[in-house]
Amino acid sequence: MSLDCRMYKAELPRVGDVVMCRIYDVNAAGSYVHLLEYNNASGLIPTSEYSRKVFHNVRKLMNVGKQLAAEVISVDTVQNYIDLSKKVVSHDDIDRCQQRFKQSSKVHTVVHKLASLLHPEDPQGMLKVYQTYVRPQEHPYENITRIGKGTNEPPKEAFLEVCPHH
């Protein structure tokens, strides 16, 4: 089963959102990134948005594989392309983004486990679990992250709490 699935209900982030990215290419135009929380949607951090400070070596500042928090400055919904800025992100923004990403990653892992149990042959299994059990809840993280703590299989009680219809 594929792990390809966005972590949130929205297909793309909104302008002003701070998102976790991973750089996959760096050139004269800027750094091309995958938005880790949005099914690896592509984005660009133009070189003018790297830093408020003067820098001389782009490859030292932005290297392939680096994971970072960046703020969305524009979204093209037609082409699903996003422009981001690193220079406008504060230390508090980075901390909040990292915490949210860590929590969302835990949920994503649990959703993968549930999808493999409920929809083992369905390539859309993760999306179905998100739509049915995670996204409708007001605070899904509080219940779903308890599933599978310290085990490879979800405890039946926790599973039933998150998935009451099964």
Image (cartoon, rainbow, N blue to C red):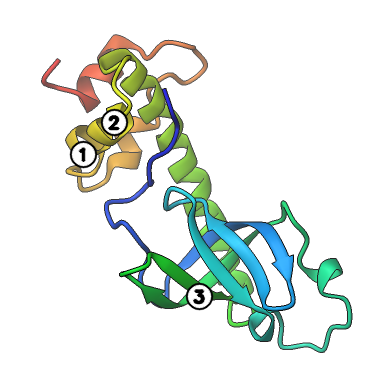
Q: Residue 131, labelled with which disc? A: 1
Q: Between 8 and 137, which is closer to the camera in this rendering?
A: 8
Q: Between 133 and 56, which is closer to the camera in this rendering?
A: 56
Residue 153's spot in the image, x, y percent?
42, 10
Q: CA distance from mark 3 to mark 2?
A: 28 Å
Q: Between 5 and 105, which is closer to the camera in this rendering?
A: 5
- Element on which disc 3 rests: strand
Q: Is residue 102 left or right of residue 29?
A: left
Residue located at (74% from left, 56% from top): 64
Of labels 3 and 1, earlier in sequence is 3
Of labels 3 and 2, earlier in sequence is 3
Q: CA distance from mark 3 to mark 1?
A: 28 Å
As drawn, 119 above or below 73: above
Circles 2 and 1 in contact, beta carbons < 8 Å: no
Q: Is residue 100 left or right of residue 61?
A: left
Residue 139's spot in the image, x, y percent?
26, 46
Q: Residue 124, labelled with which disc? A: 2
Q: Residues within 10 Å of mark 3 (few under 14, many from 20)?
A: many
Residue 17's spot in the image, x, y percent?
42, 70
Looking at the rendering, which quadrant does residue 21 occupy?
bottom right
Q: Residues within 10 Å of mark 1 (few under 14, many from 20)?
A: some
The residue indicated by pointer 3 is 83
Q: CA distance from mark 2 to mark 1?
A: 11 Å
Residue located at (81% from left, 74% from top): 58
